[in-house]
Image: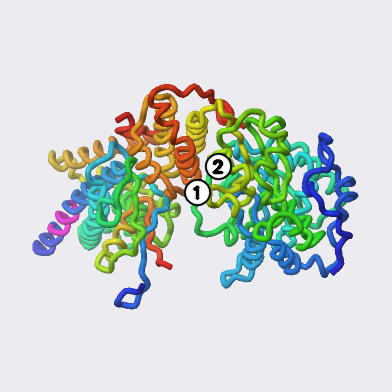
Amino acid sequence: MTRTTPWPGTLPRLLPACRVAGPVSLAEHTARYGPPPSGPGPRRPEAMIAEVDRAGLTGRGGAGFPTARKLAAVAAARHAPVAARHAPAVVANGTEGEPASAKDQVLMARSPQLVLDGAVLAAEMVGAGEALVVVHRRVREIVDEAVAERVRARADRVRLEVRTAADRFVAGEASAVVHWIERGVPAPTATPPRLAQRGLHRAPTLVQNVETLAHLALIVRYGAGWFRSAGTAAEPGSMLVTVLGAVREPGVFEVPIGTPVGRVLDQAGGASAPLQALLLGGYFGTWVDAAEAAGRPFSSAGLADLGAGTGAGLIAALPAGACGLGETARVVRYLAGESAGQCGPCRFGLPAIAGLLERLADGRGADPGLLQRWLGQVDRRGGCAHPDGTVRLVRSALRTFGAELSRHADGRCRGRAGVLPVPSGGSR
Amino acid sequence: MTLPAGRPAARLRVDFIACDGRGLCAEALPGLISLDDWGFPAVSRRAVPPRLLADARATVRACPKLALRLEPVR
Amino acid sequence: MSAALGGSQALWFVSRASGLALLAAVSAAVVLGVAARLGPRRRSPLAVGELHRTLALFSVAFLGLHVVTAIADPYVTIGWAATVLPFASPYRTLAIGMGTLAVDLGGAVLVTSVARTRLGYRAWRAVHGLAYLAWPAAFAHSVTAGNDLRIWWAALVVWGCATAVATAMVARLLSWLRGPDPAVPAEGMFR
């Protein structure tokens, strides 16, 4: 199996080595990584999928699903008993609906060619003739130019098309992206049938986060062994993490999976104030006590006993002077407003829960029994994970900031809210 | 778990995107379906008892949005 | 001859009576169908839904009686083709044709409703909307195909049905124009 010469694989892998602003051009990209392997052997779809499988790549969009399994499912749909009449479709999902997360935007802005490589290779693996790249509006121009570069160089047999993502939190959900492309409605759709069987324009559809595709592009070049040289055995590879809040240099960093949480914070210059808590994973993630979490590996296995995970690759640092309940109330009110509004429990339950949290944070007091009741009535009762993620966040806030509830009831909380970004007016 | 007639067990499932909270299902099958504080159905996750299967099927047909389904328990 | 005329009279009476009952039944069905989606939370949504279905099925029975007696009646020539082909009747072509139109449209609504679970919601909903055309056709037929509006109580039934259905349709139109309800805050939130 011919491969390009392995590039000495230290980090960063996905992002450019130096902090130069602006995207890496096609020429610079090819100079750094070399071209993808050529020849019928290594480019055979089954061989490539097998390599991705050996590498153990999982989705970097938050769900962590094994990528090779998704690829195989979409590729196999054409040979199903009721064979799909349409060629498969590939969607590179760079929507990044999470307002606190910036990793996909940074990746597309700095290394668009790597993601486009991945999209093209994924298309070849599943037998698709084209790939749709859905990106945040801030990076649309950069990605358009990157695609134009490839077209001029006649780099691909697969057609690339770029779309701007919708400006909503749920817009990044896989079926919502497809719905957005098809009908301009960024709302999730009912799951049977699965996207791998019938998705975009009734074709078997692969929806993959842009970071996952970037890793995929490198696995095809350098192999599974190289990919596994970073990260842990169970969760191999590197990941992009957005670090924000009370840190000296907030930003997006690439770290091997399993790096201790404190070391990830150090990449961002370390804490700028004593920390009380960390939000791990994103707005569907989990609050954890800062001291408890600092030594843990930033991986799903390492955080499992804290009830947390890496989620969408995000760590938000909450300083001691801030109010965790207040932050959570603001975020939940935002999430309630971002409900697609299709499912009753989410559409009515989330605003109700937000109201109770606001009362708790304000010191006006709220019935904790009612809060628990509504959390239970909303959890897993919707067409997507929006209510589930919100419930998870709230439950972790009650655990982590539970000791403060009495202080709030007495009106003694002096914390200032405003650490976590919450867009107003629905724009990011 | 199979029923005496050899058919696989089934349970009810709600498609919340289709559901409009009209409440016919909870009225028709009070033993298996209750309404949450906003009028939307909470369905028991257990298999439907054999004696209620016919009623369950009728309730599935009665839903104005076709949001209720009977699916086999795996 | 008088016996044959007597038989024809009987058929004619049954046709008119079943026609009136049919109009009342489908009108009630339409009003219930509209009411199901409008108005505040009611105590028994199931009753509304099931009554709507039952009345619709009763209508089929009245329709059968109405059509068969009208066509079998030797006094007027309508012809069996006119049951499904609009404007195929030599007698009062336009008036009978309206009735046929109502049957065709209503038939589509009925068939798709029976096969609802197999068709899926969207296909069913698209055809069910034809009810909004079927009723006016049925009403037009009612006021033009016979002379019974001269009878005061028959006129009462006919115009009563028209008022009820018109009210329901206007309410439905207003509701559609208004758009979906905003999120209703849960009661007991500030307990």
Q: Amino acid at mark 2?
A: Val
Q: Which residue is mark 1?
A: A384
**Label 1 Cα crowd, 10 Å radius (few <14 / some 14-19 / many 20+):** many
> Of helix, strand and loop, which one carries label 2?
helix
At 69% from the left edge and 42% from the top edge, which residue is drawn? Answer: A264
Q: Which residue is mark 2?
A: A170
> Of helix, strand and loop, which one carries label 1?
loop
Residue A307: image location, x then y, percent: 52, 48
Residue A148 left/right relative to A340: right
At 30% from the left edge and 46% from the top edge, which residue is drawn? Answer: C33
Q: Amino acid at mark 1?
A: Cys
Which quadrant of the rendered structure holds the C terminus of chain A? top right
Inspect this view and state whether residue A185 appears: no
Q: Is residue C19 above or below residue C179?
A: below
Q: Chain of mark 2?
A: A
Magenta residues span C10-16
